[in-house]
Image: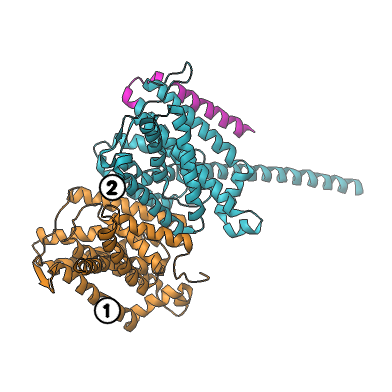
Amino acid sequence: MELFIQQLLNGLTVGSVYSLVALGLTLVYGILHIPNFAHGALYMMGGYVTLTAMTKAGLPYGLAIVVSMVAVGLLGVLMERLVFYPLRDAPPLHDKIAAIGILLFLEAFAQFIWGADYQTMPTPYGNVVTVFGLTLTIQRILIIASTVVIMILLYLFLKKTFIGASIIAMAQNREGANLVGINTNKVAMMTFLLSGGLAALAASLASPINLVFPGMGHLVILKAFVIIILGGMGSIPGAIVGGYILGFSESLGATYVSNDYKDIIAFAILVIILTVKPNGLFAKEGH
Amino acid sequence: MAAFEKRRLWLAVLAALALAFPLLVTNGYYLHMMTISFIWMIAVYGLNLFAGYTGYLSLAHAGFFAIGAYTLGILTVKVGLPFWGAFVLSAIFTSLLGLVIGLVALRTKEHFFAIYTLCVGYIIYLVIDKWDSLTGGVRGFIGIPAPADIGPLSFQTPVAQYYLVLFFLCAVMFVMYRLVYSLTGRTYIAIRNSEELALTLGISTMKNKLTSFVLSVFFTSLAGALYASFIRFLGPDIAYVTVMFDFLTYLLVGGIGTLAGPVVGTLLITFLSQQLQFLQDYRMLIFGPVLTLLIIFYPHGIAGGFIRLSAKRKETRRLQEEAKQTAAELAVSRQGRSERHVEEG
């Protein structure tokens, strides 16, 4: 029973990270209808920027995360301006390939600047606490807590501010949003800023318990795709719920099925879902 | 007809060059590189048939390439089948697998299809990587035999292997050529251009997409089996997404949806990669942006751009000739009219 609860907590940690990544991905999909394959590279860049800000510039962990969120957010905006905006009228094959090009570039770039080695990110929250017989590092608690805070902030931003409302409006109907005078360009840029920031935050939180390396985004982005298909492409609550479902099934699967094959679980889920429902769960009709 | 003759001439020159290559270049390294790039070309033709002509981006093809390679390895080394039997079986097995995956994957559309196949590709990679007892896992798979002799033909030397791979490449190109200019090929293009319209015209899109997918898997697995018998060592890396991206780059640089594209792109990129040896791991610093810039500014690639250019030139020439003809006709009719005037007068 203790093992089970421990694994649930692990699932909560992993699920939090997945949710943050999937949120950024689903926001961009909702607005532009492109699966941003380069999102995993943004995640990876987030990890490296935080690491560099901490080790080279000597910033404290929290501040380094903020720097990284801004930097990667701007990188996302740059990506939208330079690549996805010029491709807005191109056939769907094109923006997928362009995103793959960005992914390749950013990975090679990271390897060029920071090397191919696995690096560890120091954390001031490394100590272990024992609560009700469960051992937990503070870092894990931090991941769960800050994810919840960020999700609430994001919710308030989307529901209570004008720019948030325009993001939702544009996700619902691009032409309609344009007609009522929403600057779709600005909204697209804002969305990429958010998406990059969320990816950077997720990477910065997860890196102390994982590692930082150029390929760290691969599995995460694939799982984020699984999550947004699970939760409905473009759906924000779907991304959150999907992230936790995947987190739980993975940590429980690793314990009770096989640790070696735990990564396959996510893809097996996806393959099963798309086999049964080719347009994803909760597909919007008539789109 | 003149254009056709010219193209034939070009093809003859290219074929002669390819045949004479081992005689002209005695450097073993270049021969090796050439053979490898021929193998890539076969795989890229597979991708081209499906992405370029049918319009679906499959990101699982590196996985099929690896399955073709590993099946050959397992059948020859572990099962002990004779080489050519294993060769044929590996292509059949991979195509059957492609049929099963295609049946499911093709129910999804556009983005979902790309994501689905990306995940299938990743599953294939993970299975190869983790299934130690069958595939050798991360340590790799060794001891794959070189192609066995066929009667008096022996494939033990690099030159003989070069010709063997060249033979398969030519066969694949021939099949592609016949396919693209057949009704089936035209059907694929119709599906690429508008699936709804194709459906309305009474085309069974599912059946056509499936045959196109299975054929493209067949080509790619053929390349995989050739790769295994040529390199004779396999690691799970050949199933990884980076290989997939290499294929895509070759295809896009050369020209997606063209017959010459895979050859042009693969040769150019492998040649450039050799020139950029000092970059090695960082070559994607250049090829990543190249891929992105190409798709934004020059989505037809080298061969596609060339075809467009020559089509435009032909059109201008045709228009000019037409204008000349009309001018001449006008002159004739005007002359006739003035003659009539004279008679009436």
Q: Where is residue B333 in the image (x, y as percent from the top left)?
A: 80, 46
Residue at 23% x, 77% y: name it.
A149
Local crowd at mark 1 within 10 Å, few (<14), some, or many (≥20)? few
Q: Determine the main secondary structure of the stretch shown in magenta.
A: helix
Q: Position of residue A62 (x, y in %)?
A: 14, 69
Spatial CA span between label 1 and label 2: 38 Å
Q: Can residue B255 be seen in this view?
A: no
Residue where numbered disc 1 is placed: A152
Q: Is residue B149 left or right of residue A42?
A: right
Chain A palette colour? orange
Quarter-of-image position of residue B75: top left
Q: Is residue A114 visible?
A: yes
* Residue located farthest toward the front when viewing the structure as drawn: A1
Numbered range of the magenta stretch:
B1-30
* Residue located farthest toward the top when viewing the structure as drawn: B152
Q: Does the magenta stretch include residue A226?
A: no
Indicate the amino acid at tag 2.
Leu
Q: Which mark is residue B285?
A: 2
Q: Nearer the viewer, residue B14 or A46?
A: A46
Q: Is residue B76 left or right of residue A205?
A: right
Indicate the amino acid at tag 1.
Ile
Mark count: 2
Q: Which of B55 and B260 is in front in this view?
A: B55
Residue at 41% x, 50% y: name it.
B59
Q: Which of A271 and B1 is in front in this view?
A: A271
Above or below residue A90? Residue B282 is: above
Q: Position of residue A273 (x, y in %)?
A: 43, 62
Chain B palette colour? cyan
Q: Which chain is indicated by disc 2?
A: B
Local crowd at mark 2 within 10 Å, few (<14), some, or many (≥20)? many
Disc 2 element: helix
